[in-house]
Amino acid sequence: MQQKNDNPSFFDPKTLIAVAAVAIVYFGWQTYLGKKYPGYNQPKTEQTEAQKTESAATPAATATPGSAIETKSEVVAAPEAQEQIFNFKTDKVSFALTNHGMGLKNFTVNNYQDKEKNNIKIGQSDKLAMFEMRWAGDEKPVTFNVVEEAPGHYVGTAAVGATTVKRELKFNPENSSFTNTITVSNPTEDFKKGFSLMIPETVHVKGSSSFFFPSYEHQDFFIVHSGGTHETVNFSNAKENVVQQFQSTSILSVSSQYFAAAILDKSEIIPEVKVSSEVANKSALAELVYKPVQLKSEMNFSEIFYAGPKSIDALKAVDPELAQIIDFGFFGFIARPLLYVMKAFHSMVGNWGFAIILLTLLVRLCVLPFNIMSFKSMKAMQKVQPIIQNLREKYKDDPMRLNTEMMAVMKQNGANPLGGCLPMLLQIPVFFALYRVIGSSIELYNSPFVLWIHDLSAHDPFYVLPVLMSVFMFIQQKITPSTMDPMQAKIMLFLPVVFSLFMLQLPSGLTLYMVVSTLFGIIQQWLIMRDKSPAPAPAVVAKAKK
């Protein structure tokens, strides 16, 4: 008789079902945790490396809220995907180059400080590096294997399929510029989508942007030189997101009032530009985009990068074209010579405040003949006003005769209704040019004048200059001949107050220019008014009354 075996076998169906159920529950739970907590149950060293290479992974990792992350393990684990950091520092600048796009992080200008005494930082962003390279439409930078040939000289290589990219970035410490060359070998059809070089920036909103209380504390804007024209796009004071595109661009810059990061294209293929900013995220991005139409077995691209102060001499030392990122406005052809004159005065007196005073006096002396013509014409018009008023009453029903008589009277007394306007119109370009020179000169940044003014690029801390300008403008109005009616004259008396309010937050260098110019105008008017020209002949007045 066969003895019954009471010990259950491992291959018993019930046992197998139980093991399978446990395995399903275990692996199901692990899968759920893996979805909810990416990187769950990985060793700390592996997780750290994954975090370092996450931003460099090519479309190998994609994720949406609530979905699984699909990762190509060979990309994540590849040594070349790990972030490489190369630090560089001189007395002028410091930065860290990353192999993620071969961009620059924490770019700092060490020889300039902001109002809080911190070194100036350019191209700051939490997500992007300045001048990093990306394939068009890709949200992650190209990952390079970088070799430091010498301090500030880096060569990186990257392979995408059969396509090889070599990028060489070399820093010139003498002028804070970079020469950048990109060589693409065996490009495929996908390369026609192009690639981008990025300039990110955190949007700074400091001070007021209102008309009466403007601030030069921090103005951020894009500057694009496209098709022979200059385009400036302000984004720090924008109330909504900014998105613009430009074709055939040679220069791209993300600038503040006194500092800039810029790209000067030197390639055979003319790039495009995309600029954008987001108000909510306080971020801005400028992209120089190359989209080749025809492919060659080897394609070369070259650029000059610059990051630093907007000094016209420094920019010209890099490349004369780069000086165009200093926006002197419509009257730049007048502003540039004025800037060099001011620099010449500074070399003589050693103080930028006194250089502004000398420049202002020189400009006022140059336009003095036009001012004399204007004041003499205004004075003559004031003297003939009683005669003209009588003629208007006498010939109110005969406009033709009125015009004839008025012209005869003004000719006899040397009065010209346009004589007071034309000289002033000729001075307007000089005024605006000088205004832009003083407001845009990095030379005035943190430069002291005298006593309480320790920074000519900042507003007067005690508002002495704006008050003085208001007082001088009031005096000038009171002694200026006028043909306005009493009501208009009273309204004009409020202009000094309006201008004073407008100048409260502007750089003290600009206010100093206005004060000196207005004081010169008062002295000039006083001297002209001393000239006691004879009044209109009584016979002429009597004839007008008849």
Image (cartoon, rainbow, N blue to C red):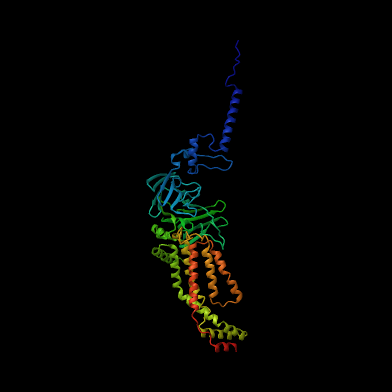
Residue in the foreground of this view, choosing between 268 and 477: 477
Image quarter in which the C terminus is found = bottom right
Q: Position of residue 308 (x, y in %)?
A: 44, 55
Q: Is residue 100 left or right of residue 398?
A: left
The quadrant of the picture occupied by the N terminus is top right
User: Does residue 36 lie above or below 326 as drawn?
Assistant: above
Q: Is residue 162 visible?
A: no
Which x, y percent locates residue 356? 45, 65
Residue, far left: 150
Q: Nearer the viewer, residue 311 or 399?
A: 311
Q: Outermost residue toward the top?
A: 1
User: Residue 484, how many percent across, how many down?
Assistant: 58, 76
x and y, in percent, of residue 91 in the image:
40, 51
Looking at the image, residue 178 sits to the left or right of residue 124; the answer is left
Q: Farthest residue toward the front?
A: 451
Total label count? Answer: 0
Frontmost residue, 198 versus 307: 307
Viewer-proximal residue among 414 and 97: 414
Residue 475 in view, yes or no: yes
Query: Above or below — where is 139 with respect to 459?
Result: above
